[in-house]
Image (cartoon, helix red, strand yellow):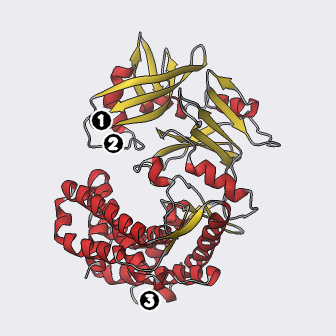
Amino acid sequence: MVDALPDWLPQQRWFGAKGREIHGVELVADRELVHGDPSLRHLLVAVDLGEETETYQLLVGCRQELPPRLAHVAIGSDDGAILYDAAHDNELTHVLLQMIRGGDDEAGLRFRHLPGVEIETDLTSIVMGAEQSNTSIVFGDSYILKLFRKVAPGLNPDLEITRALADTGTRAVVPPLGWMEVTEAGAADATTLGMLQPFLKSASEGWSLAVTSVRDLYAEADLHADEVGGDFAGESERLGAVTAEVHALLAEVLPSRIADEAENAATAKQMHERLDAALAVVPELAQFADGLRASYDALAGLKSGVPVQRIHGDFHLGQALRVDDGWKIIDFEGEPARPLSERVTLMSPLRDVAGMLRSFDYAARHLLAEQLAAPNLEYRATEWAERNIDAFCTGYARACGHDPRDDAVLLRAMELDKAVYEVVYEARNRPTWLAIPLGSIERLVR
């Protein structure tokens, strides 16, 4: 079983170490949840990457014969039986709902739900197609179970923050219903493995709505962004206001404080270090290094204190859902590539603002990167991005009384730091999109 994983893991969308050599895979935990044919095992495996080790969560099914509907998730064989990714097997996944409802404990693997929550268990499941760093399993029209594939010891920020915000009564987040966790030997806190939430079947993803708006603009040869029927600026302004509301609540219910000058310098130092690492991966970034460092140094030189708090940490249009009563923000896990200790560190909420501004730029330009639009549409992409960036910041300022654009030095450094992260991601995963963050860096460091 384990022998097949070094070849199988890098092919998975959620595997976080693509392009790196796997020195070995070790089985950390193996629990059988369903016996028979098919059977279901819950695995934790440690992937040796040389200088570090990453732990991943797997649901492994075993069948004597694999039906065609599961052929695409085959892993390998074991004594003549076929092993496969059972997250895609709707004959097995309902067991997870049953265990969450029952509050089961399987040799330290615990399933929990909030008091008073009633969970249906006889629902057919399907894995959402847009898998990212996690796997989301939708049960009927009722629930969505997010399995955290890359596992970090401790309470996952998504569960922690979502619970804290839901307790305030805000409608800006989707409340948790239950979760999966495990306590490792010697650990003080349980490690979160998955989270169950209501499924918003009528929701539209912010990214899809924004891209539709961009397509409408590109289709109109003689209209500006504010003249097109699919203008997105109104939604961007409302999203900015909701983001400010969530930031304000996070500052109230979780720790927050004012960072001193030394912390500003430490933040800038981390940005320099991330740039050093990125330069080793993407040579094309070198031409902008001086401008990037100048922006980071300007942040280090800030004299005034910067408010810091818990934040979303990986905020973009794909993390916002539009429903009938407004926007909801989801996925408070932070950037999975960064260690948990960094993801729970108090940071400026402008990191989230910068992430969303970068997302508007992506929405405007990804069609150009895919060569699906004519070169003369570059100025229209710029117009759309600038209009929606301004609208988002205006909405944010209206809701909290402080305009992110007033903190130009900090916001610019945050945007550039995010773009550097994107450069590495695109180089490893979508090389044809590399021009998007590189172009943004070029414009920002001028």
| Up-down relation of residue 103 to residue 114 (above or below) | above
The part of the image, by quadrant, that contains residue 414 is bottom left
Question: Tags 2 and 1 in contact by the CB under 8 Å rule?
Answer: yes
- Local crowd size for mark 1, using a 10 Å CA cut-off: few (<14), some (14–19), many (≥20): some
Question: Tags 3 and 2 in contact by the CB under 8 Å rule?
Answer: no
| Up-down relation of residue 372 to residue 276 (above or below) | below
Dot 1 or dot 3: first in sequence order is 1
* Residue at disc 1, secondary structure: loop
Dot 2 or dot 1: first in sequence order is 2
In the rendered view of the protein, which quadrant contains the C terminus?
Answer: bottom left
| Up-down relation of residue 371 to residue 75 (above or below) | below
Residue 336: x and y in percent read 44, 49
Q: Which residue is mark 1?
A: 49
- Local crowd size for mark 3, using a 10 Å CA cut-off: few (<14), some (14–19), many (≥20): few
Q: Nearer the viewer, residue 410 or 74?
A: 410
Q: CA distance from mark 1 to mark 3?
A: 52 Å
Which mark is on residue 223? Answer: 3
Q: Residue at x 52, y 81 (%)?
A: 393
Callout 2, which amino acid? Ala
Which mark is on residue 17? Answer: 2
Callout 3, which amino acid? Leu
Q: Residue at x 25, y 36 (%)?
A: 21
- Local crowd size for mark 2, using a 10 Å CA cut-off: few (<14), some (14–19), many (≥20): some
The part of the image, by quadrant, that contains residue 293 is bottom left
Q: Is residue 151 visible?
A: yes
Q: CA distance from mark 2 to mark 1?
A: 8 Å
Left or right placement of residue 339 versus residue 119 in this view: left
